[in-house]
Image (spheres, grey):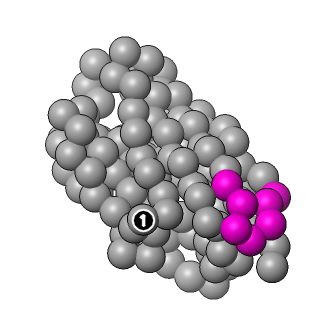
Amino acid sequence: QVQLVESGGGLVRAGGSLRLSCAASGTIFSINAMGWYRQAPGKQRELVAAITRGGSTNYADSVKGRFTISRDNAKITVYLQMNSLKPEDTAVYYCAADRRGVGFPRDYWGQGTQVTVSS
């Protein structure tokens, strides 16, 4: 089994930045892709960004140029650097991991961390 623990959420003003982290533990040798999803109130969960063990990335159009996903394969940790934040980025952000090298990781999920962007 794999456990994912997110950190780094919080409250920020529009135009500001936040960095999310997600550390994996457990059967970590099985992990390939890792990524971030978000879910705003009343909306479906959507992919924000994902990255494979080899470094291939996949971004939602709405965050391209503002968010950057990266990972530390030695620590099995994935990061999401969020710049130029907008109020519409407000959501619960979930870390996800997958045993496959896919653009939409979904085998394992974290508990989520709240990101709130004030206008």
Expressed as whole percent of the image width and height from the top left, the position of residue 6 reads 61, 39
Q: Above or below — where is 49 with respect to 52? A: below
The residue that disc 1 covers is: 65
Q: The C terminus is located in which quarter?
A: bottom right
Q: Give the range drawn in magenta.
A: 11-17
Q: Quadrant of residue 97?
A: top left
Find out whether residue 60 is within the magenta segment.
no
Q: Can residue 47 be seen in this view?
A: no
Whether residue 12 is in magenta: the answer is yes
> Which residue occupies the extreme top position in the image?
74
- Image quarter where the N terminus lies is top left
In the rendered structure, the answer to whether residue 104 lies left or right of residue 90 reads left
Please, is residue 50 above or below residue 97 in the view? below
The residue that appears at 42% across and 65% down in the rendered structure is 65
- 33 displayed left or right of 116: left
Vertical placement of residue 76 versus 105, above or below: above
Residue drawn at x 49%, y 63% as measured from the top left: 66
